[in-house]
Amino acid sequence: MINVTDTDVELSRKSEPQRTCIGCRGKGGRSVLLRIVCDENAVLVLDSRKAMPGRGAWLHADETCLSQATTRRAWGRALRLRSAVSTGALAEQVEREIRSTSYDDENTGRTRRGTSTTVTESGFDAMSTR
């Protein structure tokens, strides 16, 4: 299981509401997580603008979080669905999104979305007061 560190949460804006990844159950802001919705054909779709109608599930841009959510069958619970959902197309969309907007953090070994930040040896942001 992936542990989300404080530095992952710091990537989101301070005033931004926190969401929970359905894969690893870690917290993150809307700008850090991907939003997944279910269309009328019971197919999971990546909501890249985060504005599609309906209930959404949040997921880190990480292959392990995607596989954990699928293994635990978290999609139906998070989206409040009664029928089985297809995740085949979603895996391709998420992998494409990961490749286009992610980078590898050398300190945690975790792939994170967004712009690069300066992190010290202790794993905290260089401007952090902790």
Image (tube, grey):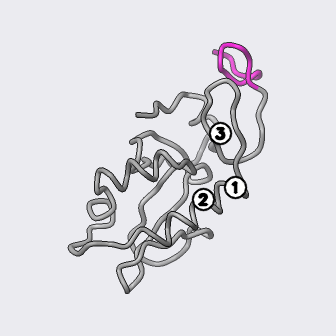
How much space separates mark 3 and mark 2, taking CA atoms? 21 Å
Which residue is pictured at 32% across the width and 52% down the height?
A: 71
What kind of residue is marked 3? Leu
For residue 11, which numbered disc appears in the image? 3
Q: Which residue is mark 1?
A: 99
In the depicted view, which residue is nearer to us: 22 or 68? 68
- How far from the left and from the top, in percent, is residue 59? 48, 53
Horizontal relation, residue 84 to residue 4: left or right: left
Q: Are marks 3 and 1 in contact (CB under 8 Å)?
A: no
In the depicted view, which residue is nearer to us: 95 or 36? 95
Which residue is pictured at 46% across the width and 78% down the height?
A: 53
Q: Are marks 3 and 2 in contact (CB under 8 Å)?
A: no
What kind of residue is marked 1? Arg
Kind of element beneath mark 1: helix
How much space separates mark 1 and mark 2, taking CA atoms? 6 Å
> How many other residues sit within 10 Å of disc 2, few (<14), some (14-19) or many (≥20)?
some
| Residue 124 in the image: above or below residue 38 | above
Q: Which residues are magenta?
A: 119-130
Residue 125 located within the stretch drawn in magenta:
yes
- How far from the left and from the top, in percent, is residue 87? 41, 68
Kind of element beneath mark 3: loop
Q: Are marks 1 and 2 in contact (CB under 8 Å)?
A: yes
Name, please, the residue furthest toward the left. Answer: 82
